Amino acid sequence: MNLEALLHQVEKPSRYIGGEINTFSKEIGDDTIRFCFAFPDVYEVGMSHLGMQIIYSLLNQQKDVFCERTFSPWPDMEALMRENHYKLFSLETKSSIGDMDILGFTLQYELSYTNILNMLNLSGISLYSKDRHDREPLIIAGGPCAYNPEPIADFVDIFFIGEAEEVLLEFLEVYRPYKSGQISKNEMLLKAANIPGLYVPKFYQPTYDESGILLGYQRTEAVPEKISKRFIRNFDEGFTLETMIVPFADIVHDRAMIELFRGCTKGCRFCQAGMLYRPIRERKPETVINTIDKILSSTGFEEISLTSLSTMDYSKIGPLVTDLVEKYEKENISLSLPSLRLDSFSIDVVKEIQKVKKTGLTFAPEAGTQRLRDVINKGVTEANILDTYKNIFSLGWHRVKLYFMIGLPTETTEDLDGISEIANLGTFTFKQVKPEYMKKSVQVTVSTSCFVPKPFTPFQWMAQETVDGFYSKINHLKTKLLNKKVVYNYHDPVTSVLEGVFARGDRRLSKVIETAYFKGCKFDGWAEFFKPKLWDEALKECGIDPDFYTSRERSFDEFLPWDIIDAGINKQYLISEYQKALNADSTADCRDGCTGCGLNVNLIGGPC
Amino acid sequence: MLTLRLVYTKENYMKFLSHLELMKLFERIFRFHQLPLKYSEGFNPIPKMTFAAPLSVGYSSLREVMEVQLSEQLPLERVLAIQFPSGIKIIDASYVNTKKSLMAHLSHAEYLIKVDMKKNIEQLPLKEWIEKFLNAETVTIEKKGKNGKMRSLEILPLINRYEIVYQGETETIFRAVLQSGSQGSLNPEALIEAFFGFYQMAHEIQTIQVERRLLLFTDSDGQLKDIFSLKDDV
């Protein structure tokens, strides 16, 4: 059966057709490096990812590279493909993925690992690096989860640590002689391993003590002891995405995206991104405005998203928003600002953005009491929260979403009760300040997620809350959040604990992922497909105790699986932040003075 | 008010775009080609566009039509030069001055229907089967009504023409002119299922591919004519 015949039988066939505005089509010659960007989730999720758009545009600007895309087929499509022996294909040329030179996976989420194996299997590619012959594609991977690459280290040939824009091009320099047959695969990998930022796991063999604790890595070739992360030093003048693929299907984030800055100076202790993407690097407002103009004039998007880890902290946010609204209001192009923070919430900015379209408002106090917010260094005060309520409700909003985490270090019942108090403060304040014309009633949505301690954060040594512990906290919240105007949603603890296994796991987990995959696990991040029983079986069969990775507290001198990666931050800094956390002692924003994380000395060699 | 009418094709992979996806695509292409679009009033302004007789996902078409409101006139050469993803091509553009939408006149559509069967049917007397089928006393199908309940639909009065144009080993191509529009429609796949069902062979159908070739209206003499011959004089 041909592809069209399959597409007639599936839900949302536009996921698989390619040909969207601004996609590429290139002549494929003998020296064309065929690269396929692989997103281990469904099209709508993958196409919302800015990193994919950047890599696609960057690689297709290279003369001898043709970058195509592939995504996880939805289970209905996968079933038909398997039934008809149809291999996974690229959207651009519908080529079988096995015909590519390089397959590049992005690692956004630990629970997408089984989808990576499924995509390899659907392409007929051997899962383990050691089993792949020269004709099979080279498997590379990058993205935030690559900072602890170990759980999937047996499957991936090369990990890209940090921002890939520069190092991808450096890597192509060592790939070309391999492609033309001048050097062997092993020689190419060895050259790659000596490019800063590239980790080739086969040259690093882990050793463990008799209790199963990692002792370190033995290098089998002349490769660096540690792999330091890469980042774009001059972000304003570095590669800038000036056009985007415009998807057909209704994707999750269907809009123009422009990065205002990378990095974050707030120093929230739970936040891995805040630690990984240091130092802060802003784009100039002129660069932002020019780039938006270019993106809009080649895509026709009707919404612009100003992205970053904390958009309201952009140093010129007020003037930028005013300029953009003035410029695009007439064309009915609206502005959205993700990651609003309660402490820097500027009412003028919100007044501006609502001129075109009144979008929903979401805030993340993260914890219910001042004490616990100090523990995690989330610089939001009770006064900030009250002011924000007063401002938004008096301007005519009547719905607000609040995000919290449960299972944070030192959390007590009082902290949980604080969540309900913050929600009630919202419904109470609404009645006090709502405008006369407001006839609708207030709705406060409280969402809790289960905290997963992540590598390179001050909480990387702590024990994660157990599934039972999470459930008793959720049940407690259910008894507290009884206000009829408050809606309570919570994230499933079982998936968060499994995420916790992989977040801080080691290379022994590769076998577990393979076992779970062959038992039928895939799309683990999707509640309707998650099969915790099969994961339990896989862990047992592999003799792996998940508690070893989750609820075990590590000592500061234990060698951690990700200690082979140098993220630029000193361990001593993380230890001192952890100790300050336990004393509910906060650390100031590092824009107001260096807090000594070590990045400037380790990776920059000067001030940030 | 200025109405721009576009006639376009929807073929190859583009036939898999849903109606909503197609509308979004046109909107975005119009935006980045800077067409002077007119917007609806209200909280979420959207461009004023209408698409005639939405095509089912997976059907290709040689002549689709849509209308968009503009605030000022743009040279038609510029409109005709707009590039769409491969599979969609603008074949005609005109400014029209109609009070009533063109599609309000639609009464029928002509289709080519390619049917692939699981077994060889080369020897079947399909021509006679069609004649017998069309002369049957009654043929009904189950159709989901507006209220979501299943109801029985008599389909023979909805068939204006039904004939065979090619008969191969497993592949057969039919041409059909079926009622389509506000007064009730018959879906070509439903016709094929009813036809083979009439001979207890519905389970032998492997795939059905449909191409819409013409949109038709009924003139004052009761003749079916290409809807685009109506032009501005309606």
Image (spheres, rainbow, N blue to C red):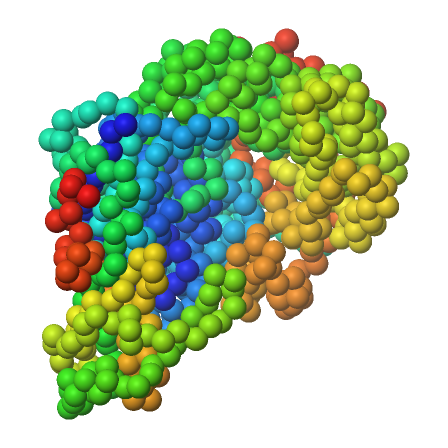
Q: Does residue A236 lie above or below A156 as drawn? A: above
At horizontal 18% and vertical 26% (from top left) the residue drawn is B74
Residue at (43% x, 13% y) in the render: A326
Q: Quadrant of residue A354?
A: top right
Image quadrant occupied by the N terminus of chain A: bottom left
Q: Quadrant for residue A313, please give it.
A: top right
Q: Nearer the viewer, residue B117 or A205?
A: B117
Q: Pinpoint residue A454: horizontal percent, then vertical percent.
A: 64, 38
**Which is more toward the observer, A443 or A121?**
A443
Using the image as rendered, state which of residue A251 and residue A307 is in the foreground.
Answer: A251
Q: Is residue B83 above or below residue A134?
A: above
Whole-percent x, y for residue A92 in the image: 26, 48
Percent position (x, y) of residue A348?
A: 58, 12
Residue located at (46% from left, 65% from top): B145
Q: Is residue A322 left or right of residue A14?
A: right
**Depicted A462 relative to depicted A547: above or below:** above
